[in-house]
Amino acid sequence: MSKIIGIDLGTTNSVVAVMEGGEPVVIANQEGGRTTPSVVAFTKSGERLAGQVAKRQAVTNAENTVYSIKRFMGRRYDEVNEEMKMVPYKVTRSS
Protein backbone atom coordinates (compact mmCIF):
# COMPACT_ATOMS: atom_id res chain seq x y z
CA MET A 1 0.00 0.00 0.00
CA SER A 2 1.24 3.49 -0.83
CA LYS A 3 2.08 5.98 1.89
CA ILE A 4 0.34 9.35 1.94
CA ILE A 5 2.24 12.41 3.11
CA GLY A 6 0.98 15.96 3.44
CA ILE A 7 3.20 19.03 3.57
CA ASP A 8 1.97 22.45 4.64
CA LEU A 9 4.68 24.82 3.43
CA GLY A 10 3.87 28.00 5.29
CA THR A 11 5.47 31.41 4.98
CA THR A 12 6.43 31.35 8.66
CA ASN A 13 6.17 27.69 9.71
CA SER A 14 5.78 24.33 7.99
CA VAL A 15 4.19 21.03 9.05
CA VAL A 16 4.49 17.48 7.69
CA ALA A 17 2.00 14.67 8.37
CA VAL A 18 1.46 11.09 7.23
CA MET A 19 -1.73 9.05 7.10
CA GLU A 20 -1.77 6.20 9.63
CA GLY A 21 -4.90 4.13 10.06
CA GLY A 22 -6.93 6.65 8.09
CA GLU A 23 -5.90 9.54 10.35
CA PRO A 24 -3.26 12.24 9.75
CA VAL A 25 -0.33 12.08 12.16
CA VAL A 26 1.98 15.09 12.37
CA ILE A 27 5.68 14.22 12.27
CA ALA A 28 7.55 15.97 15.07
CA ASN A 29 10.77 17.80 14.23
CA GLN A 30 14.13 17.08 15.91
CA GLU A 31 13.17 19.29 18.85
CA GLY A 32 9.82 17.56 19.32
CA GLY A 33 7.74 20.40 17.88
CA ARG A 34 4.80 19.93 15.53
CA THR A 35 5.67 23.01 13.49
CA THR A 36 9.07 23.91 12.06
CA PRO A 37 10.13 27.44 11.10
CA SER A 38 10.31 27.81 7.30
CA VAL A 39 13.92 28.97 7.50
CA VAL A 40 17.12 27.66 5.88
CA ALA A 41 20.63 28.97 6.50
CA PHE A 42 24.15 28.38 5.28
CA THR A 43 27.04 28.86 7.70
CA LYS A 44 30.43 30.29 6.76
CA SER A 45 31.83 26.73 6.84
CA GLY A 46 29.18 25.56 4.35
CA GLU A 47 26.96 23.73 6.82
CA ARG A 48 23.23 23.74 6.00
CA LEU A 49 20.78 24.51 8.78
CA ALA A 50 17.00 24.25 8.75
CA GLY A 51 14.12 25.09 11.05
CA GLN A 52 14.61 26.42 14.57
CA VAL A 53 18.41 26.09 14.42
CA ALA A 54 18.51 28.25 11.29
CA LYS A 55 16.12 30.79 12.79
CA ARG A 56 18.19 31.14 15.98
CA GLN A 57 21.35 32.15 14.12
CA ALA A 58 19.63 34.58 11.71
CA VAL A 59 20.63 37.66 13.72
CA THR A 60 24.34 36.93 13.29
CA ASN A 61 24.12 35.50 9.75
CA ALA A 62 21.25 37.42 8.13
CA GLU A 63 22.65 37.51 4.58
CA ASN A 64 22.89 33.70 4.49
CA THR A 65 19.53 32.95 6.13
CA VAL A 66 16.56 32.47 3.82
CA TYR A 67 12.98 32.90 5.05
CA SER A 68 9.59 34.09 3.73
CA ILE A 69 10.45 32.41 0.43
CA LYS A 70 6.79 31.89 -0.44
CA ARG A 71 6.59 35.60 -1.23
CA PHE A 72 8.85 34.88 -4.22
CA MET A 73 7.57 31.49 -5.38
CA GLY A 74 5.71 31.41 -8.67
CA ARG A 75 6.55 35.01 -9.48
CA ARG A 76 8.94 36.45 -12.03
CA TYR A 77 12.05 38.33 -10.93
CA ASP A 78 10.61 41.60 -12.25
CA GLU A 79 7.54 41.17 -10.02
CA VAL A 80 9.35 40.98 -6.67
CA ASN A 81 11.31 44.23 -6.53
CA GLU A 82 9.52 45.50 -3.42
CA GLU A 83 9.83 42.16 -1.61
CA MET A 84 13.58 42.01 -2.34
CA LYS A 85 14.02 45.27 -0.41
CA MET A 86 12.55 43.66 2.70
CA VAL A 87 15.00 40.76 3.07
CA PRO A 88 18.74 40.78 3.84
CA TYR A 89 19.56 37.84 1.56
CA LYS A 90 20.30 38.18 -2.15
CA VAL A 91 17.61 37.27 -4.69
CA THR A 92 18.94 36.58 -8.19
CA ARG A 93 17.38 36.14 -11.59
CA SER A 94 17.19 32.53 -12.78
CA SER A 95 19.52 31.55 -15.58
Image (cartoon, helix red, strand yellow):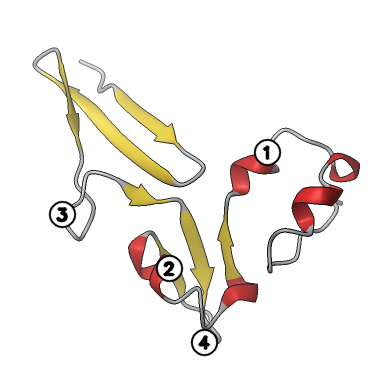
Q: Which residue is mark 1?
A: 73
First of labels 3, 4 by sequence position: 3
Residue at point 65% right, 74% down?
63
The tag on residue 37 is none
Q: CA distance from mark 4 to mark 1?
A: 28 Å
Query: Viewer-nearest of labels 2 and 4?
Result: 2
Badge 3 is on which residue?
Answer: 32
Quadrant in which the N terminus appears: top left
Question: Distance from label 3 to label 4 (Cα)?
Answer: 27 Å
**Which element carries disc 2, helix, strand or loop?**
helix
Query: To which residue does mark 2 refer?
Result: 54
Residue 4 image point, x, y percent: 28, 21
Q: Determine the CA span between mark 2 and mark 4.
A: 14 Å
Look at the numbered disc 3 and give the secondary structure of its residue. Answer: loop
Question: At 87% from the left edge and 51% from the top edge, which residue is drawn?
Answer: 95
Quick check: can you spot residue 65? yes
